[in-house]
Image: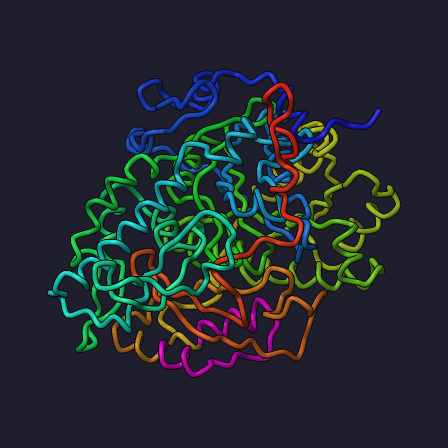
């Protein structure tokens, strides 16, 4: 008899009331705002109450360069938290909220898999508590107020040709990447070229994820730059008087969402997917709250160590004054075979490069060899041995998908030991460096590139931002997740390449600059056979096909 699907396992689970999960985690009754029986928002007052409590240890889960189907990084993070719970630790898991784009696109859900999931899985992967809808509404309110201002007299003197603010939508839709608005005569606005980003890549998502509290959220929203005047002066959301209404739309969304693992452990799921085109990490406020409540916090950044982990360490940890204790690097047999064209030994070059990235940040890396159904014991053992030979602090095979926390106990013991070592964490670049040098540091020290090429638009943008006093901001790179380089065709551990940067966007509210590498788009498209084609309602009204 075959193992049930991840959806069937989640639907059969006996969930605990979220009030019990909260109480076990140390969250008081008046700090909890239930959204039904099995999910809730958590008040920021937890941070005030526990201000003097020392932070727990912080472990960041990342991966080697994935195959298009993903390597089970979330499954590993969930099973690790479950395993730590079985050891008697007090863990809390911090994950990113799924986006409807990937859920209905190629990737499917983002709640983990098998017996290592966060639940309620269907709620989590679909509308959840409405955070992404609130972000979409706030983003598009600013766009509407901006266009209305230009049409209704343009008192601020905004040059329409300089408007950079785009609308967003939480769905993969390539036809919206480049559009023209305002057609149909003056009553419908002034025609101009613009486009949509996916909601997860919007600056409003980034602001929500990086805000420390409501006051910080309100200030960051006001600092958004939407374009410039005819004289070249930046125009902000505050000047358009849009920031207050945006904050009202987001005042519930900023509160972290509390759910549970299949084994009844606490998990915050809040903000931050898409580490290839956004910063790709859970919210700062969720992480800070978890660190006050738990002995050890497991957080997961999107995609591989060159993307989500780099951004977590260079942007989130620096901004939030977080000190990570260790790294868990997920590797799989199929990923090494993918990068080595069927040869595990050759594919281990990619693993070695990612271990080197962790060392560049001064952190110990434990390799978690995530076992998939069908993997042979011989291959799993060989990947573990290759990890040790290529510089891992330790390496363990993880059977979390099949066995839940019990399959991750050995990994959990090793990670707990690694996290107890002194941290030598340090970001890889100084904020004082010029914009070009910061981008170059990421490309050379993390990706292994020979250097970068700033294309004309990017060079012009870098010069402009330096003159505007934005040169001290960190860099959020937007590049493919399928390669350490900018080119998805360059697998394994490429060398001898130069990273082209075609443009740079200023996220003045979030507090960083986005460097667009190669042909990376901030609005994905659906594939020929999207996951949406398999999702449906069964005869009993339950969801089928969601994975």
Which color mode does the image show? rainbow
Q: Choose top left, top right, bottom left or bottom right for residue 238.
A: bottom left
> From the viewer's perspective, is residue 431 above or below residue 418?
below
Q: Residue 108 colored magenta?
A: no
Q: Position of residue 124 (x, y in %)?
A: 51, 33
Residue shown at the point (48%, 40%) measured from the top left: 97
Q: How many labels, in total?
A: 0
Q: Position of residue 303 (x, y in %)?
A: 59, 53
Residue shown at the point (56%, 70%) measured from the top left: 445
Q: Is residue 217 visible?
A: yes
| Region in magenta | 437-462
Residue shown at the point (82%, 63%) measured from the top left: 341
Q: Position of residue 59 (x, y in %)?
A: 54, 44
> From the viewer's perspective, is residue 444 above or below residue 116?
below
Looking at this view, is 156 or 20 the one in front? 156
Which corner quadrant holds the C terminus?
A: top right
Say whether residue 465 is left or right of residue 20: left
Looking at this view, is 479 or 214 the one in front? 479
Say whether residue 231 is left or right of residue 87: left
Which corner quadrant holds the N terminus?
A: top right
In the image, farthest residue toward the front: 184
Say whether residue 155 is left or right of residue 179: left
Assign the magenta stretch its main secondary structure: helix
Q: Is residue 474 visible?
A: no
Residue shown at the point (71%, 30%) measured from the top left: 5
Say whether residue 33 is left or right of residue 355: left
Q: Choose top left, top right, bottom left or bottom right for residue 164.
A: bottom left
Q: Position of residue 54 (x, y in %)?
A: 39, 36
Q: Residue 438 colored magenta?
A: yes
């Amino acid at each position: 008899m075959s193992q049930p699907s991840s959806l069937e396992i989640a639907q059969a689970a006996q969930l605990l009331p979220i009030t019990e999960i909260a109480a076990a985690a140390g969250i008081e009754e008046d700090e909890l705002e239930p959204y039904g029986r099995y999910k809730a928002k958590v008040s920021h007052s937890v941070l005030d109450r526990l201000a003097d409590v020392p932070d727990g240890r912080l472990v960041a889960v990342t991966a080697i360069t994935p195959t298009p189907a993903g390597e089970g990084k979330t499954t590993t993070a969930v099973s690790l938290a479950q395993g730590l719970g079985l050891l008697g630790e007090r863990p809390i898991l911090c994950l990113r909220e799924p986006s409807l784009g990937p859920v209905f696109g190629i990737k499917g859900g983002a709640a983990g898999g098998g017996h290592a999931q966060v639940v309620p899985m269907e709620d989590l992967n679909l509308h959840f508590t409405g955070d992404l809808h609130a972000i979409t509404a706030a983003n598009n309110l600013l766009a509407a107020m901006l266009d209305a201002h230009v049409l209704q007299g343009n008192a601020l003197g905004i040059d329409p040709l300089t408007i950079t603010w785009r609308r967003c939508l939480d769905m993969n839709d390539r036809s919206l990447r480049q559009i023209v608005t305002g057609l149909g005569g003056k009553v419908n606005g002034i025609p101009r070229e613009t486009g949509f980003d996916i909601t997860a890549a919007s600056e409003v998502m980034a602001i929500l994820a990086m805000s420390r509290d409501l006051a910080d959220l309100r200030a960051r929203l006001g600092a958004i730059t939407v374009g410039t005047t005819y004289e070249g002066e930046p125009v902000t959301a505050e000047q358009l008087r849009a920031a207050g209404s945006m904050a009202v739309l987001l005042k519930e969304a900023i509160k972290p969402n509390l759910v549970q693992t299949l084994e009844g452990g606490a998990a915050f799921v809040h903000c931050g997917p898409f580490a290839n085109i956004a910063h790709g990490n859970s919210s700062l406020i969720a992480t800070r709250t978890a660190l006050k409540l738990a002995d050890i916090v497991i957080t997961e950044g999107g995609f591989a160590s060159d993307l989500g982990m780099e951004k977590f360490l260079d942007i989130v940890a620096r901004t939030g004054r977080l000190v990570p204790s260790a790294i868990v690097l997920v590797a799989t047999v199929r990923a090494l075979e993918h990068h080595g064209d069927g040869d595990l030994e050759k594919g281990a070059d990619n693993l070695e490069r990612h271990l080197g990235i962790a060392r560049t940040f001064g952190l110990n890396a434990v390799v978690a060899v995530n076992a998939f159904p069908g993997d042979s014991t011989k291959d799993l053992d060989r990947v573990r041995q290759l990890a040790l030979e290529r510089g891992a602090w330790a390496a363990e095979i993880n059977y979390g998908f099949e066995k839940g926390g019990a399959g991750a106990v050995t990994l959990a013991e090793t990670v707990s030991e690694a996290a107890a070592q002194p941290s030598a964490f340090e970001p890889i670049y100084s904020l004082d460096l010029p914009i070009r040098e910061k981008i170059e540091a990421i490309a050379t020290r993390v990706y292994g590139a020979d250097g970068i090429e700033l294309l004309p638009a990017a060079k012009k943008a870098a010069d402009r931002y330096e003159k505007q006093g934005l040169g001290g901001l960190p860099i959020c790179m937007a590049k493919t997740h399928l390669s350490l380089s900018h080119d998805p065709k360059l697998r394994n551990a490429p060398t001898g390449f130069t990273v082209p940067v075609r443009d740079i966007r200023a996220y003045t509210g979030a507090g960083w600059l986005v460097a667009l590498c190669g042909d990376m788009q901030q609005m994905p498209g659906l594939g020929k056979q999207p996951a949406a084609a398999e999702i449906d309602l069964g005869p009993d009204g339950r969801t089928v096909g969601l994975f």
